[in-house]
Amino acid sequence: MARKHRDAPPEVNAGSMADIAFLLLIFFLVTTTIQTDQGISRKLPPIDETNQEPPPVKEKNIFTVLINRNDQLLVEDKLMDLRELRQAAIDFLDNGGDGSCTYCKGARDVASSDNPDKAIISLQNDAETSYEAYVAVQNELVAAYYFLRDRECLARYGKTFRELEAMFDDPKTKEAQRARIEPLIKDIQTLFPQKLSEAEPKRN
Protein backbone atom coordinates (compact mmCIF):
# COMPACT_ATOMS: atom_id res chain seq x y z
CA MET A 1 0.00 0.00 0.00
CA ALA A 2 1.43 3.31 -1.08
CA ARG A 3 2.00 5.86 1.60
CA LYS A 4 1.03 9.52 1.17
CA HIS A 5 3.89 11.88 0.78
CA ARG A 6 4.74 13.62 3.99
CA ASP A 7 4.69 17.10 2.34
CA ALA A 8 1.35 16.67 0.45
CA PRO A 9 -1.34 19.27 1.37
CA PRO A 10 -4.24 18.03 3.49
CA GLU A 11 -7.35 17.00 1.53
CA VAL A 12 -10.69 18.74 2.05
CA ASN A 13 -13.76 16.56 2.30
CA ALA A 14 -15.95 18.07 -0.43
CA GLY A 15 -18.81 15.68 0.24
CA SER A 16 -19.98 17.46 3.39
CA MET A 17 -19.77 20.88 1.68
CA ALA A 18 -22.03 19.64 -1.14
CA ASP A 19 -24.54 18.45 1.45
CA ILE A 20 -24.51 21.85 3.16
CA ALA A 21 -24.95 23.67 -0.16
CA PHE A 22 -27.86 21.40 -1.05
CA LEU A 23 -29.54 22.03 2.31
CA LEU A 24 -29.10 25.80 1.89
CA LEU A 25 -30.68 25.61 -1.57
CA ILE A 26 -33.69 23.77 -0.18
CA PHE A 27 -33.98 26.31 2.64
CA PHE A 28 -34.06 29.26 0.24
CA LEU A 29 -36.55 27.54 -2.07
CA VAL A 30 -38.91 26.86 0.83
CA THR A 31 -38.66 30.23 2.54
CA THR A 32 -38.47 32.59 -0.48
CA THR A 33 -41.72 34.31 -1.41
CA ILE A 34 -42.21 34.58 -5.16
CA GLN A 35 -44.04 37.73 -6.16
CA THR A 36 -46.90 36.99 -8.56
CA ASP A 37 -48.22 39.38 -11.18
CA GLN A 38 -51.40 41.19 -10.27
CA GLY A 39 -53.95 42.56 -12.67
CA ILE A 40 -57.59 42.98 -13.46
CA SER A 41 -59.67 39.87 -14.01
CA ARG A 42 -61.57 40.08 -17.27
CA LYS A 43 -63.49 37.46 -19.23
CA LEU A 44 -63.25 38.16 -22.93
CA PRO A 45 -66.38 37.72 -25.06
CA PRO A 46 -66.46 34.93 -27.66
CA ILE A 47 -65.20 35.74 -31.16
CA ASP A 48 -68.00 36.91 -33.42
CA GLU A 49 -67.60 35.17 -36.77
CA THR A 50 -70.76 36.55 -38.34
CA ASN A 51 -68.98 39.72 -39.57
CA GLN A 52 -72.10 41.74 -38.87
CA GLU A 53 -71.84 45.47 -38.44
CA PRO A 54 -72.60 46.54 -34.84
CA PRO A 55 -75.83 48.48 -34.44
CA PRO A 56 -75.53 52.27 -34.18
CA VAL A 57 -75.26 53.62 -30.64
CA LYS A 58 -76.79 56.92 -29.59
CA GLU A 59 -74.33 59.40 -28.14
CA LYS A 60 -76.43 59.79 -25.00
CA ASN A 61 -76.03 56.07 -24.27
CA ILE A 62 -72.24 56.39 -24.04
CA PHE A 63 -70.63 57.50 -20.78
CA THR A 64 -67.14 58.70 -21.74
CA VAL A 65 -64.30 58.48 -19.21
CA LEU A 66 -60.84 59.72 -20.17
CA ILE A 67 -57.63 59.52 -18.10
CA ASN A 68 -54.82 61.81 -19.23
CA ARG A 69 -51.07 61.45 -18.74
CA ASN A 70 -51.34 63.33 -15.42
CA ASP A 71 -53.90 60.81 -14.11
CA GLN A 72 -56.68 63.41 -14.29
CA LEU A 73 -60.23 62.32 -15.07
CA LEU A 74 -62.31 63.88 -17.82
CA VAL A 75 -65.86 62.52 -17.57
CA GLU A 76 -68.36 63.62 -20.20
CA ASP A 77 -65.97 66.44 -21.13
CA LYS A 78 -65.77 67.69 -17.53
CA LEU A 79 -62.99 67.35 -14.97
CA MET A 80 -64.03 65.02 -12.15
CA ASP A 81 -62.50 63.74 -8.95
CA LEU A 82 -62.11 59.97 -8.63
CA ARG A 83 -64.35 59.98 -5.54
CA GLU A 84 -67.25 61.26 -7.65
CA LEU A 85 -66.86 58.77 -10.50
CA ARG A 86 -68.77 55.85 -8.98
CA GLN A 87 -71.91 57.86 -8.28
CA ALA A 88 -71.75 59.50 -11.72
CA ALA A 89 -71.59 56.05 -13.34
CA ILE A 90 -74.49 54.81 -11.18
CA ASP A 91 -76.63 57.79 -12.19
CA PHE A 92 -75.90 57.10 -15.85
CA LEU A 93 -76.57 53.35 -15.74
CA ASP A 94 -79.70 53.70 -13.57
CA ASN A 95 -81.19 56.64 -15.50
CA GLY A 96 -83.93 54.85 -17.48
CA GLY A 97 -84.48 57.72 -19.88
CA ASP A 98 -86.86 55.96 -22.28
CA GLY A 99 -89.14 54.63 -19.52
CA SER A 100 -88.66 50.96 -20.49
CA CYS A 101 -86.72 50.13 -17.32
CA THR A 102 -89.29 49.42 -14.61
CA TYR A 103 -86.65 48.75 -11.93
CA CYS A 104 -84.48 51.82 -12.58
CA LYS A 105 -84.56 54.49 -9.87
CA GLY A 106 -82.71 57.23 -11.72
CA ALA A 107 -83.74 60.71 -12.84
CA ARG A 108 -85.20 59.47 -16.17
CA ASP A 109 -83.40 62.26 -17.95
CA VAL A 110 -84.16 62.00 -21.67
CA ALA A 111 -80.74 63.47 -22.42
CA SER A 112 -78.99 60.57 -20.64
CA SER A 113 -79.01 56.78 -21.14
CA ASP A 114 -82.23 55.09 -22.26
CA ASN A 115 -81.90 51.93 -20.15
CA PRO A 116 -79.18 49.73 -18.58
CA ASP A 117 -79.08 47.40 -21.59
CA LYS A 118 -78.17 50.25 -23.94
CA ALA A 119 -75.88 52.11 -21.53
CA ILE A 120 -72.18 51.77 -22.40
CA ILE A 121 -69.22 53.09 -20.40
CA SER A 122 -66.32 54.01 -22.66
CA LEU A 123 -62.92 54.17 -20.94
CA GLN A 124 -59.87 55.58 -22.65
CA ASN A 125 -56.47 56.40 -21.19
CA ASP A 126 -53.25 58.01 -22.32
CA ALA A 127 -50.20 55.87 -23.04
CA GLU A 128 -48.48 57.58 -20.09
CA THR A 129 -51.34 57.07 -17.63
CA SER A 130 -50.08 55.33 -14.49
CA TYR A 131 -51.20 51.78 -13.86
CA GLU A 132 -52.42 52.77 -10.37
CA ALA A 133 -54.77 55.40 -11.81
CA TYR A 134 -56.03 52.99 -14.46
CA VAL A 135 -56.83 50.29 -11.88
CA ALA A 136 -58.46 52.82 -9.53
CA VAL A 137 -60.78 54.04 -12.29
CA GLN A 138 -61.60 50.47 -13.30
CA ASN A 139 -62.46 49.63 -9.69
CA GLU A 140 -64.86 52.56 -9.39
CA LEU A 141 -66.64 51.72 -12.64
CA VAL A 142 -67.02 48.02 -11.77
CA ALA A 143 -68.18 49.04 -8.28
CA ALA A 144 -70.98 51.05 -9.90
CA TYR A 145 -72.26 47.93 -11.66
CA TYR A 146 -72.00 45.89 -8.46
CA PHE A 147 -73.88 48.53 -6.47
CA LEU A 148 -76.86 48.33 -8.84
CA ARG A 149 -76.71 44.55 -9.07
CA ASP A 150 -76.55 44.23 -5.26
CA ARG A 151 -79.52 46.56 -4.88
CA GLU A 152 -81.74 44.72 -7.33
CA CYS A 153 -80.65 41.26 -6.22
CA LEU A 154 -81.38 42.10 -2.58
CA ALA A 155 -84.83 43.40 -3.50
CA ARG A 156 -85.70 40.31 -5.56
CA TYR A 157 -83.96 37.42 -3.81
CA GLY A 158 -83.09 38.67 -0.33
CA LYS A 159 -79.33 38.41 -0.90
CA THR A 160 -76.84 40.70 -2.56
CA PHE A 161 -75.33 39.81 -5.92
CA ARG A 162 -71.91 39.43 -4.30
CA GLU A 163 -73.34 36.96 -1.78
CA LEU A 164 -74.85 34.84 -4.56
CA GLU A 165 -71.56 34.89 -6.48
CA ALA A 166 -69.63 33.89 -3.34
CA MET A 167 -72.03 31.01 -2.69
CA PHE A 168 -71.78 29.85 -6.30
CA ASP A 169 -67.96 29.92 -6.25
CA ASP A 170 -67.68 28.26 -2.84
CA PRO A 171 -66.37 24.70 -3.34
CA LYS A 172 -68.48 23.61 -0.36
CA THR A 173 -71.70 24.54 -2.16
CA LYS A 174 -73.58 21.49 -3.40
CA GLU A 175 -74.33 21.11 -7.10
CA ALA A 176 -78.08 21.22 -6.53
CA GLN A 177 -77.79 24.54 -4.71
CA ARG A 178 -75.38 25.88 -7.35
CA ALA A 179 -77.94 24.96 -10.02
CA ARG A 180 -80.55 27.09 -8.21
CA ILE A 181 -78.20 30.05 -7.80
CA GLU A 182 -76.91 30.22 -11.39
CA PRO A 183 -80.16 31.44 -13.03
CA LEU A 184 -80.53 34.11 -10.34
CA ILE A 185 -77.04 35.42 -11.11
CA LYS A 186 -77.74 35.44 -14.85
CA ASP A 187 -81.03 37.25 -14.26
CA ILE A 188 -79.33 40.10 -12.39
CA GLN A 189 -76.55 40.26 -14.98
CA THR A 190 -79.23 40.69 -17.64
CA LEU A 191 -80.85 43.54 -15.72
CA PHE A 192 -77.54 45.41 -15.40
CA PRO A 193 -75.17 44.04 -18.07
CA GLN A 194 -71.59 45.17 -17.69
CA LYS A 195 -70.83 47.01 -20.92
CA LEU A 196 -67.43 48.52 -20.31
CA SER A 197 -65.65 49.42 -23.52
CA GLU A 198 -61.93 50.17 -23.54
CA ALA A 199 -60.33 52.04 -26.43
CA GLU A 200 -56.68 51.97 -27.42
CA PRO A 201 -54.49 54.30 -25.32
CA LYS A 202 -53.78 57.64 -26.92
CA ARG A 203 -50.19 58.54 -27.73
CA ASN A 204 -49.35 62.21 -27.91
Image: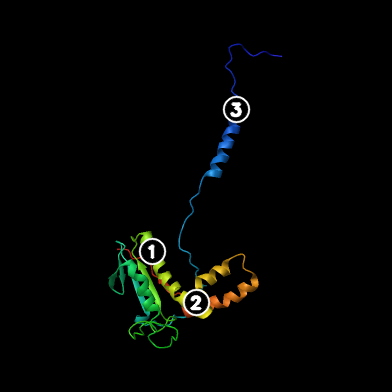
CA–CA distance between discs 3 and 1? 56 Å
The tag earlier along the polypeptide, 2 or 1, is 1
Q: Amino acid at mark 2?
A: Leu
Evaluate whether residue 120 shows in this view: yes
13 is higher (above) or lower (below) than 3? below
When asked about the image quadrant of residue 29, the answer is top right
Counting from the top left corner in percent of width and height, residue 165 is at 54, 70
> Dot 2: within a 10 Å radius of its alpha carbon, few (fewer than 14), some, or many (20 or more) residues?
some
Identified at 62% across, 65% down, the residue is 172
Q: Quadrant of the C terminus?
A: bottom left
Can you tell which of label 2 and label 3 is closer to the viewer? 2
> Dot 3: within a 10 Å radius of its alpha carbon, few (fewer than 14), some, or many (20 or more) residues?
few
Identified at 58% across, 40% down, the residue is 26
Q: Which disc number belongs to residue 14?
A: 3
Q: Amino acid at mark 1?
A: Ala
Q: Which residue is mark 2?
A: 154
> What sort of colour scheme is used for the picture?
rainbow
Q: Which residue is mark 1?
A: 136
Counting from the top left corner in percent of width and height, residue 17 is at 58, 30
Dots 3 and 1: beta carbons under 8 Å?
no
Q: Nearer the viewer, residue 201 or 109?
A: 109
Q: Secondary structure at mark 2?
A: helix
Q: Secondary structure at mark 1?
A: helix
The tag earlier along the polypeptide, 2 or 3, is 3
Identified at 40% across, 63% down, the residue is 135
Q: Amino acid at mark 3?
A: Ala
